[in-house]
Image (cartoon, coloured by chain):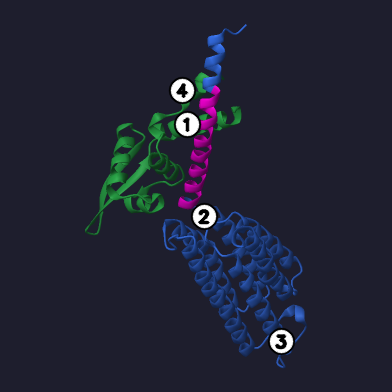
Chain colours: A green, B blue
Amino acid sequence: MTMLNIIQNINKAFDHRIRLGIMSVLMVNESADFNMLKELLGVTDGNLASHTKALELENYIQIEKQFIGKKPNTKYSATKEGRDAFTAHIEALEKLIKKS
Amino acid sequence: MFGQQNIYYLLCISKYFKMENEKYLNDITEIKNLMNKSSRFISLSGLSGILAGVYALVGAWMAYKTIYFDTSTMGAYRDLIISEAAVIRLLIIATSVLVLSIVTGIVLSISKARKSHENVWNSASKRLVINFMIPLATGGFFIIFLIEKNMLGLVAPLTLIFYGLACVNASKYTLGDVRYLGITMIALGLLSTWFLGYGLLFWALGFGGCHILYGSLMYFKYERK
């Protein structure tokens, strides 16, 4: 594979620490709720919400709102598309590291 | 071959990749770290394993004295016919070792989690406990029924086997070393089924020796830094 091909696999959607983090967590967990992500990534509510929104718009994650008792609870999970895109992204990262 | 301009571009690109490379490496480290942290309980204390091993050895010694110096023991060792009072004493010893080990494990893991600013009761630790408890509770009830029916010979092998299965099952949700502890326990359990009558010896080797061995391994690998 040429350098150009590899770079095409580097996904802009994951080119941010928080979005990268959200995807990493969702790759190994069936789902994660808002508080779990917040705690793991150490970010503010607003910050996390905007990044999950961005990933949702790309169709990489899906958001499910529900109630646990009276408390609203937002659950996130990775879509098939998101998993494939993230896997390709990781592979591209690894190849780039090996090349240089 | 190369024009002046081409060489210039080549230099630019390679410089760009040197800088970017560091970022990619950081990204990979961050991905691995978060995948681990979110799915595994990594604050499991190795020291608590060592202490659990020590409790088990003390417990085994007390059990040994109860069984083999029990004046009401009848028949050969192999038949393991012991009085009801001795059975109750053994149960008390076993329960104390279990409770003491669990309490030590919880306390030391909490303090280890605090040191690395991690939450102890999160989805990872919940999953760990649930997946550890399913084989363990199954074995626990099974063994209690065996004791109730006075079939004592298989108690030691079965505690080892079910505990080993619990460790293997739980290892997906915590430090990977627990898997090898589990496999060793299962092997010891099977061996002790073959050499029936040496149950206590295998029990001490498994719950005492293996805990101390794997506990120290984990302690030196993750905690002493």
| Residue at numbered disc 3 | B65
Q: Which residues are magenta?
A: B14-38
For mark 4, does the 10 Å Cα neighbourhood hold few (<14), some (14 to 19), or many (20 or more) residues?
A: few
Chain under numbered label 4: A
Q: Is residue B72 visible?
A: yes
- Residue drawn 31% across and 50% down? A44
| Residue at numbered disc 4 | A8
For mark 3, does the 10 Å Cα neighbourhood hold few (<14), some (14 to 19), or many (20 or more) residues?
A: few
- Camera-side residue of B155 and A92: A92
Q: In which quadrant of the rendered image does the C terminus of chain A lie?
A: top right
Q: Nearer the viewer, mark 3 or mark 1?
A: 1
- Camera-side residue of B55 and B140: B55
| Residue at numbered disc 1 | A89
| Residue at numbered disc 2 | B173
Chain under numbered label 1: A
Amino acid found under the numbered disc labelled 1: His
